[in-house]
Image: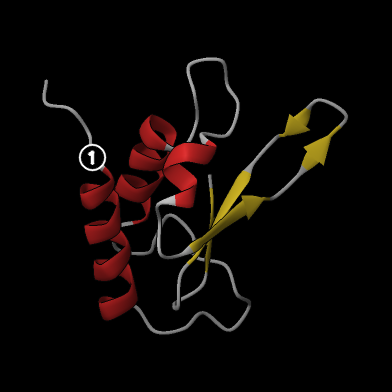
Amino acid sequence: MSEVTLEQLLQVIRTIEETNPINPDGFLYDDTAGHDELIALAGELLITDEGKPNYGAISRLPVKVGPGEVDIFGWLTGVIYTTAGKVVF
């Protein structure tokens, strides 16, 4: 299995932004082209083996990534902010 890269993640984000209209409610769902692939790549790259945000990878992305739901332990979900809408992972 090949190593997943940030460039692969960025390419999926670009594809989503180029091929999907802006979602009026702000969120993109699993019927959005590229959604499932983005979720899989985000899980590989943006979450550490300990289940915490990978701030090193997140800081290298040209798109905003932040917490969605949080509790006293930290992030429960993350959000990738694309120009087409938000993707929860």
Place of residue 22 in the rendered image (x, y in percent of width and height, measured from the top left): 46, 83
Residue drawn at (48%, 16%) of the image: 49
Is 51 above or below relative to 41?
Answer: above
Is 63 above or below relative to 76?
Answer: below
Place of residue 35 in the rendered image (x, y in percent of width and height, measured from the top left): 37, 55
Q: Is residue 30 left or right of residue 77?
A: left
Place of residue 24 in the rendered image (x, y in percent of width and height, measured from the top left): 58, 84
- Residue where numbered disc 1 is placed: 5
Residue in front for this viewpoint, 81 or 87: 81
* Colour scheme in use: secondary structure
Is 15 above or below relative to 69?
Answer: below
Q: Residues within 10 Å of mark 1 (few under 14, many from 20)?
A: few
Q: Is residue 23 left or right of residue 68?
A: left
Outermost residue, top side: 50
Q: Is residue 14 left or right of residue 54?
A: left
Amino acid type, label 1: Thr
Is 28 above or below relative to 53?
Answer: below
Outermost residue, left side: 2
Residue in front for this viewpoint, 58 or 21: 58
Quadrant housing residue 50: top right
Location of the N terminus (image quadrant): top left
Q: Is residue 76 left or right of residue 72?
A: left
Place of residue 19 in the rendered image (x, y in percent of width and height, measured from the top left): 26, 77
Quadrant housing residue 65: bottom right
Q: In what element is the residue under mark 1? A: loop
Residue drawn at (48%, 50%) of the image: 59
